[in-house]
């Protein structure tokens, strides 16, 4: 027994020694871009510096002062949070509804599961192009359907060309692509809920709604936490859909932090300002995920 324990201890030490270099290497590749972005955000690093090869000059927070003085940053932050909340709420509700349907014994459930992941597999840029064609104001399918539903009263429908509806159009495209993964994760969580507890609650007279909120949801807490956290991060850094479908327009209605960072760095050719946007963007994402995890932990404890 003593020899066995010493062998297990040696194996653990050996595994730990192997993990340390891997952890340090991963930390290096994660921190280097972050540190580089923060350093550049405090520098005057424009086209002339890139061509001449001279290092950037410390500008005493000028990039941040310029961003906070303009309306562009505030508009991008609002658009980012509105988009994230809109997509996550509808994604979770629709994903849970589909997961509940697929978890039942209805006919065709297995076939639907097999083709359900098709939108998620399609590249994001291709998804954006598909929805651009669907929303096309001259010959798009959505325009035709709106005209059909309204009996010809609405003949002009350009969702992506209107500031009030463009963000919703991008959100619909994001939902189409992301709902399958959310459904698959929630379906896996549903299948881990014990049937005997559900049957016991049914015998005690608990309604379907009571069983769902008192048994199903608590057992799925860990799956829900991971799925929503992934969705927050995915939609916080969403760039291809916005850039392909609207380019941040019309009139800045779909300019999120990703679009603003790209424009500042590679359109205006001001890497310092672009890095400042990226730093603010990263901090807001970390704070948002942290607050969500804190709130979820408090809910889970109750």
Image (cartoon, helix red, strand yellow):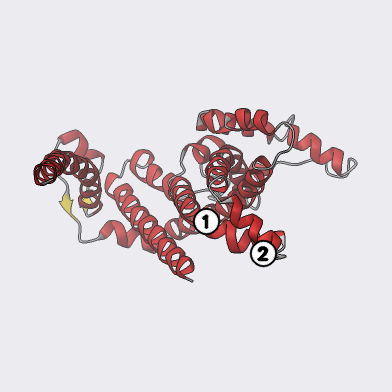
Which residue carries the number 1 mark? 219
Contact, CB < 8 Å: mark 1 with mark 2? no
- Tell how many labels: 2
Residue 56: which numbered mark, if any? none
Viewer can see residue 54: no
Counting from the top left corner in percent of width and height, residue 272 is at 27, 49
Q: Could you say whether the residue bearing mark 2 is in a helix, strand or loop?
A: helix
Q: Which mark is residue 210?
A: 2
Give the residue at the far right of this rendering.
Answer: 151
Give the position of the N terminus as an image quadrant: top left
89 left or right of 278? right
Residue 45 spot, x, y in % from top left: 22, 46
* Residue at the spot 34% in from the left edge and 53% down from the top edge: 282
Relative to residue 90, is residue 50 drawn left or right? left
Of 279 and 187, nearer the camera is 187
User: Alpha carbon of mark 1 to alpha carbon of mark 2: how far?
Assistant: 14 Å
- Whole-percent x, y for residue 175 in the image: 59, 43
Q: Residue at x 59, y 57 (%)?
A: 197
- At label 1, counting other C-alpha atoms closer than 10 Å, the crowd grade (few under 14, some 14-19, many 20 or more) is some
Above-or-below relation of 179 to 117: below
Choose the circle earlier in sequence order: 1 or 2: 2
Element at badge 1? helix
């Amino acid at each position: 027994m003593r020899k066995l324990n010493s062998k297990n201890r040696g194996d653990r030490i050996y595994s730990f020694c192997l993990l340390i270099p891997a952890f340090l290497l991963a930390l290096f590749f994660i921190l280097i871009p972050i540190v580089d972005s923060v350093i550049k955000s405090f520098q005057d690093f424009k086209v002339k510096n890139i061509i001449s090869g001279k290092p950037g000059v410390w500008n005493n927070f000028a990039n941040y002062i310029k961003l906070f003085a303009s309306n562009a940053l505030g508009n991008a932050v609002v658009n980012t949070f509105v988009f994230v909340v809109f997509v996550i709420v509808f994604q979770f509700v629709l994903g849970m509804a589909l997961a509940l349907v697929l978890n039942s014994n209805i006919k065709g459930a297995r076939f639907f599961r097999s083709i359900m992941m098709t939108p998620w597999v399609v590249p994001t840029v291709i998804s954006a192009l598909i929805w651009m064609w669907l929303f096309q104001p001259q010959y798009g399918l959505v325009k035709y359907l709106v005209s059909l539903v309204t009996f010809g009263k609405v003949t002009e429908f350009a969702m992506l060309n209107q500031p009030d509806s463009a963000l919703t159009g991008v959100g619909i495209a994001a939902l189409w692509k992301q709902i399958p993964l959310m459904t698959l994760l929630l379906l896996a969580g549903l299948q881990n809920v014990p049937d005997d507890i559900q049957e016991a609650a049914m015998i005690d007279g608990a309604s379907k709604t009571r069983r769902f909120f008192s048994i199903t949801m608590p057992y799925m807490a860990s799956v829900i936490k991971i799925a929503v956290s992934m969705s927050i991060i995915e939609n916080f850094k969403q760039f291809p859909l916005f850039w392909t479908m609207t380019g941040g327009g019309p009139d800045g209605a779909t300019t999120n932090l990703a679009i603003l960072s790209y424009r500042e760095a590679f359109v205006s050719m001001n890497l310092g300002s672009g890095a400042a946007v990226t730093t603010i963007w990263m901090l807001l994402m970390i704070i948002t995920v942290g607050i969500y995890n804190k709130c979820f932990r408090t809910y889970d404890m109750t």
